[in-house]
Amino acid sequence: MKVMASHQILAVVSMNRDSVGGQTPIFYVSDHHELEKTSLYLARILMAAIHDLDNGTYILVKH
Amino acid sequence: MEYLPTTILATLGGILARLYMLRRDYRQYPSYPQGWAIHLFVGFIGALLGAIMVPSFLEKEFGAVSFMLLAASQFREVRNVERLTLSNMEPTELVPRGAAYIEGIARVFEARNYIAIWISLAIGIVSELLAFSLPLRVMGAIVVAVFLATVLNRLMRGDSISDIADVEIAEIEFDGPLLTVGGVVMMNVGHSEARALYCERALGAKIVPKDPNAKATLANIGQMQAIAHDVSSMVGVFMDVGEQEFTPLVRRDPESGKLVLAMIPAQSSKEAFLEAISNVPVLEGAIRKPLLSVAARMSE
């Protein structure tokens, strides 16, 4: 049987070290371009959707 | 073989009626040719059951009659098989049908066999009543079969979305990362390229219910999923496996009860998009009629 995580934050990509933390894998990036690139790569690897929290942080969620 | 003409006529009528009810449309379900073979054979069993009901009654073989009624209950299995097949295929769909749609399809397939039984039974009765002349028998059988198949098929045909709601194009906008259609927030689209693609190619529509009954029907989650599935199967969907931000979405405006749909179709034709939404069937299991209750009429 294949078990898949859903409705879960799989990864966090952030430019803002102060606003993120916790157990989820966090990817720190330096600028907006890298934020977009890293999150797109992760989204395609994890087959997840990218959501923008509007504070320099993107989260990847499997729906 | 005194009852041979009746049996042949009624079985033939039943199986032709089942064939008439096997429609091939955009859904390609039942699949062709294997799915057809299965359903025609099950229809043949049903037709034969209906056909020999009348001769066994006339011969006072009530044991046979009750045995046949028992056999008819086997058709319930058709629904289970259909449900199982469609549920098993669900993970292979880019846009899933949803449990409510699957249940609706399974129910239709079961019901169509019963209709085939009714029709062959009716032909059997007419054929025995007109037993004195063979040409009259054949004519009577044809008339009854055509009449019943048309009437029953029409009665069994459900509404489509255009019967219960008005479908219009709605503007797609972004409020920050939030994708909104006609003022209803659909989802958070994080990536700027995805947002650009939405602005460039996506189409949005609003489905405005015509009355409180339609409002309650459209509020069914299964109905919403059925709209997303059927529209994407008709106009095509611009997405790949795992591209969750491009999944067609149907959301509900709690204020007015209208549904909004946003998707990126394969071809951006507004007319085709609206036509597709209008033709989505209203699921039998989703239909609600709150207006039949006193409380709903009081709150109107």
Image (cartoon, coloured by chain):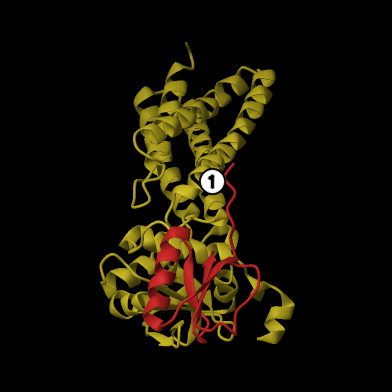
Chain colours: A red, B yellow
- Residue found at the very far top of the displayed protein: B1
Q: Quadrant of the C terminus of chain A?
A: bottom right
Q: Amino acid at mark 1?
A: Ser
- Residue found at the very far right of the displayed protein: B295
In the rendered view, does B26 fall on the left or right side of B127?
A: left
Q: Is residue B101 above or below residue B121?
A: below
Circle 1 residues within 10 Å: few <14, some 14–19, many ≥20: some
In the rendered view, does B203 fall on the left or right side of A43?
A: left
Q: Is residue B243 visible?
A: no
Q: Is residue B266 visible?
A: yes
Q: Quadrant of the N terminus of chain A?
A: top right
Q: Secondary structure at mark 1?
A: helix
Q: Identify the residue at horizontal 56%, vertical 58% (top origin).
A: B284
Given residues B17 and B25, the one toward you in this image is B25
Given residues B110 and B81, the one toward you in this image is B81
Subunit ID for the residue under disc 1: B
Q: Is residue B41 above or below residue A25?
A: above
- Relative image position of residue B24 (x, y in whole percent): 34, 46
Q: Is residue A5 above or below residue B204?
A: above
Q: Identify the residue at horizontal 37%, vertical 35% (top origin).
A: B142
Q: Is residue B115 above or below residue B96?
A: above
- Relative image position of residue B74 (x, y in whole percent): 61, 31
Task: Tell me the residue that label 1 is attached to.
Answer: B87
- Relative image position of residue B136 (x, y in whole percent): 37, 29
